[in-house]
Image: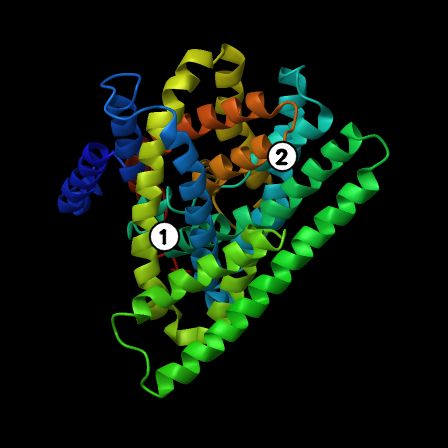
Amino acid sequence: MYEQLAVLCVFVFLFSLVSKRLERTDYSGPMIFVASGFIMGPAVLGWFPGENPDTLLRVLADLTLALFLFIDAANADLPTLRKRYSIPARMLFIGLPGAIVLGFIAAFLMFDQLTVLEAAMLATMLAATDAALGKAVVTNKAVPARLRESLNVESGLNDGLCVPILFLFIALELGTMEGDRSGLALTLLAEELGIGLLVGLGVSGVGAWLLKVCWHRGWVSDIWVQMTTVALALSCFALAQSLHGSGYIAAFAGGMLFGFIARDSTHKLVHPAEGIGETLALVTWMLFGIAVVGDVLDLVTWQVVAYALVSLTAVRILPNYLALAGSGETASSKLFLGWFGPRGLASIVFAIIVLQEGVPGGDLIALIVSCTVILSLVLHGVSANPMSRWIAKMEPPNDPTD
């Protein structure tokens, strides 16, 4: 155990030393950690076992997604969003449903083993994009500001929007399996979402108020203020889960309220949590490489790879391209926005949820999701910098909206 911990910590330390240099290359942090986990795992060197990391992966992925949901929701730049709402609004409320519908059609036609609702689950799980994996694009100043902000808002909010949709399909599927109990399943879903919403708003509202009062009285030290956001986010998640509510909804709703209450202080309060979230995410990616990648390579079929590629290309690009019709965006901007929808942590957690709920087609769904995430890590990772340079050349340098 301690040998493995030493290897992990030394690797994280070495990565931190060259992290800024690696940002200028075509190899992202998640790519490096997944590849390293695969090499150090049972498939190659055997430094890490394949069984124990699988359990740890579930816990870490849960906590990391909850933290990112809270952070992304808190960081939602509402004034900027009101000023430049057109692109992210179109992508969230037209492109996202369109991607789910198109992904459902493709899944239903390509996999006879999946029921209608299971195909819908798969499409929903892969409609959510990962803001962290798109960091190389949204922080690249060569990319026009309106495109960076739009991708940041869309990827930060779409996973939260996908949670209730996924839970709805799971409830309907499990209700169908149990005969006439679909009404009960929907009631339980409503309770889960309602509890999550109430817990998230309640905990975050009280927590933000207490933080403001204690801060003005000088009771909060500079060291411990760095942990307030992390503790509050995980409190929303864990308390909702313990009450049989949705921790993801709680984290997302709590983050929105926290950002609204904190206003101009949001970035200062949330920034330390982002560093903790990034570290947890990279460790999660390494465990993903250890526990999952080897199995995926052994089980993958051409149909799985084909669907993964379709999901990353046509299913993502076409609905968003159409959603941006009439927005004034150029064809190159529409293609750029459509392409950068990397799949990552949210999709993995959704796959874990489906497996835990006992959905009959859960194993196949998890395999497809894992394959899609692996391909996304590579394709979006290596294309981030070249595509950013391309869009900088295609877009006019004196864009009046930037």
Q: Give the SS element for disc 2.
A: loop
> Dot 2 corresponds to which residue?
357
> Dot 1 corresponds to which residue?
144
Q: Residues within 10 Å of mark 2 (few under 14, many from 20)?
A: few
Image-quadrant location for residue 323? top right
- Name the spot of residue 200 as percent of width and height, x first: 56, 62
- The residues bearing labels 2 and 1 have C-alpha atoms spaced at a distance of 42 Å
Q: Give the SS element for disc 1.
A: loop
Q: Residue at x 63, y 40 (%)?
A: 166
Q: Nearer the viewer, residue 401 or 353?
A: 353
Indicate the amino acid at tag 2.
Glu
Q: Residue at x 26, y 16 (%)?
A: 44
- Compared to 244, does 54 lie above or below? above
- Compared to 313, does 137 lie above or below? below
Q: Nearer the viewer, residue 19 or 397?
A: 19
- Residue 294 marker: none
Q: Nearer the viewer, mark 2 or mark 1?
A: 2
Image-quadrant location for residue 53? top left
- Horizontal side of 178 relative to 159 (left or right) equals right
Query: Where's the C terminus, which quadrant?
Result: bottom left
- Horizontal side of 92 relative to 271 (left or right) equals right
- Name the spot of residue 181 as percent of width and height, x first: 83, 37
Q: Residue at x 79, y 30 (%)?
A: 178
Q: Residue at x 60, y 37 (%)?
A: 124
Q: Earlier in the sequence, mark 2 or mark 1?
A: 1
